[in-house]
Amino acid sequence: MTDAAAQKPTTGKRIELTLRALVLGCLLAVVFTAANTYLGLLVGLTFASAIPAAVISMAILRAFRTSTIWENMTVQTVASVGGAMSSIIFVLPGLVMIGWWMEFPFWQSVLICVFGGVLGVTFSIPLRRALVTGSDLPYPEGVAAAEVLKVGSRGAEQTESAVRENKAGLWVVVFGSIVSAGYALLVAGRVFAGEAAKFIKLPASLGAGATGIGFSMQFALLGAGHLIGLTVGLAQLFGLILAWCIAVPVLTSPDTVAWLTAHNIPSLAGTMAAGAPVEELATNVWRNEVRFMGAGVIGVAAIWTLLKLAGPLVGGLSSALAAQARRKSGEVLARTEQDIPIGIVGMLSLACLVGIAALLAWFAQAAPALAGSTGMLVVGGLVYVVLIGFAVAAICGYMAGLIGSSNSPVSGVGILAIVIASLLMLGVMAIAGVPADPSIIAFALIVTSVVFAVAVIANDNLQDLKTGQLVEATPWRQQTALIVGVGAGALVIPFILNLLNQAFGFEGGPPAIVEGAEPLAAPQATLISALARGVIGGDLRWDLIGVGAVIGVVIIILDVVLSRATKGKIKLPPLAVGIGFYLPAAVTTMLVVGAVCGWIYEKAIAKTRFVDVGRRMGVLLASGLIVGESLFGVFTAGVIVATRNDAPFAMLPEGSAWPAMLAGIVAFAGLTFLLYSWIIRQSAKV
């Protein structure tokens, strides 16, 4: 008897797309969307929420005797697509960074997410048979989520060990969230330091430049590091070394400054006041110069990743579509092959396109520089969304099947989309005689936001449909749940973005309430908005981007050489190197620590009888750590905005003699050790 058959309720009724599943899925979608929004703006990464959502669903719906694996599948689908919707933050904050928006208008933001997200679902429905049922793509996250559902949703025939694992998994998520949020509270209360950093002036023999190093004691980063794995973590460490051990010292060296000045090349270190503090010198050079080199590395790495997948994409689609074409017309489809009818898919797509046209027309009419070209802009925008949108749906769906949703380089899609959109806007400017204006950059970002929403939902959609195939779910019910999840995620995103914008701010945006705080990094949004400004306005430091692009090419060559020399055992993922180059040093360092901790943990359980359970518990712990601190960060932003107090949880006065840094390091290390030891014991009991 199959797992799916074993779980069918005794009444014979198929319980799958239920109101309680949709409500629970929406609640979890709100939680995971908020957590992913905060994490994505902090470090440019999001985490897959399918597995923790499935575990929580199984624990809660167990209270209903009629709950089934398919109902849990519905909850997981709604929650995971809601979490994936948060990736729109890789583009949308760019409108604040360029000064077009001072805040995130609710309905505009929601409609961008909804129209793009629903198109992501409808565009990927015709691809299901080609990329899921008629394909041998591995879908790593979809398969893993299906296994978790099979283990924990066996109804009356569920084994005792499966029940124990399900309960233990829920407690791991909850306890990890509590520890993470509790530590963040103590950091906000100034009991522990949240970051440790040291900046130094190098001796003359090493060029006399400045540099520094630091690490951020945040459990969300530790959890994210665990999930990205050792290979990606070490690649980010390599990027960190390139940035802070080579680029920053070289650009702050007096010899380099003199050479740049002699050749009329802008040098920030050369314009800063003599005798500037070493921390100020190193930080400003990294933020305003080295980071743009990192942007060049990211851009080249993302494009290279997409190019590598072009061959498998074309070959896979061609063979799968050819096989599909050979099927006899009029075939009666089994329940597990029933998609939303193509007529309804067409109407949904048309409704979204009409909505997008209205949104673009309203935007163009509100911008004096664009009002005279409204018709051309709307038609061009719709053609762009349809052609590029369907292309990215296919590309991202294939990438999700090949390497997983979390590892899929959707940033590359965003980079290509904004460059193409910006070039098209230049064409509009030339044809219509429109002068350079911020509204042109903003229009390009709006269109790119819609396309990006298509990309991230298609990226998640096919992964969820693979899980559904493995547990014999009904595709049309899953696709309906996906659309519900898009709505749930879209409704919460503007609230979270506005809270974080008011409390902490974005670079180039309005001032934040927290004085002196570092604006949220939002690395992808910063890069995409900078590219739009650079292409349209011509004021980008292309020389720095170009240097980064050359570095990216060298890294790509190193990756290829290492991979071939070691038969794939050692890799240097270029995109991860670029992220390590681009992110603040303290953030990257803790991601690396998390990756190493996860590797040590998996080595420790590798030869135990509970290795598979232990790995799943590790993923759940990491997810809990991210969710706890991220939700506390969102809650803190809300309290700051409500009270106008930049330190609402302060327990100690600023500048207290209490050794907060030492206490924080000891507590963080101790809690990390205790958490991993605890989940080993929990895994052994299952």
Image: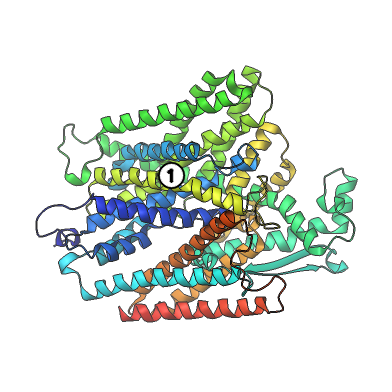
* Amino acid type, label 1: Ala
- Taking the image as shown, residue 295 lies to the left or right of residue 146, namely right
Q: How is the image coloured?
A: rainbow
Above or below, 28 relative to 263: below
Say if residue 568 shows up in the picture.
Answer: no
The residue carrying mark 1 is: 490
- Taking the image as shown, residue 261 lies to the left or right of residue 676, namely right
Determine the residue positioned at 64% across, 23% down: 369
Instruction: Bin the neighbour count of mark 1 within 10 Å (Cα to Cα): few under 14, some 14-19, many 20 and up.
Output: many
Q: Quadrant of residue 327?
A: top left
Determine the residue positioned at 62% across, 54% down: 504
Above or below, 226 relative to 526: below
Say if residue 505 shows up in the picture.
Answer: yes
Q: Position of residue 394 (x, y in %)?
A: 40, 40
- Closer to the camera, 88 or 248? 88
Instruction: Name the element at disc 1.
Output: helix
Q: Position of residue 494 (x, y in %)?
A: 50, 45
- Closer to the camera, 15 or 556? 15
Determine the residue positioned at 23% across, 65% down: 62
- Closer to the camera, 602 or 123? 123
Above or below, 467 relative to 310: below
Quarter of the rendering occupied by the C terminus: bottom left
- Closer to the camera, 270 or 133? 270
Q: Position of residue 337 (x, y in %)?
A: 22, 43
Above or below, 47 relative to 419: below
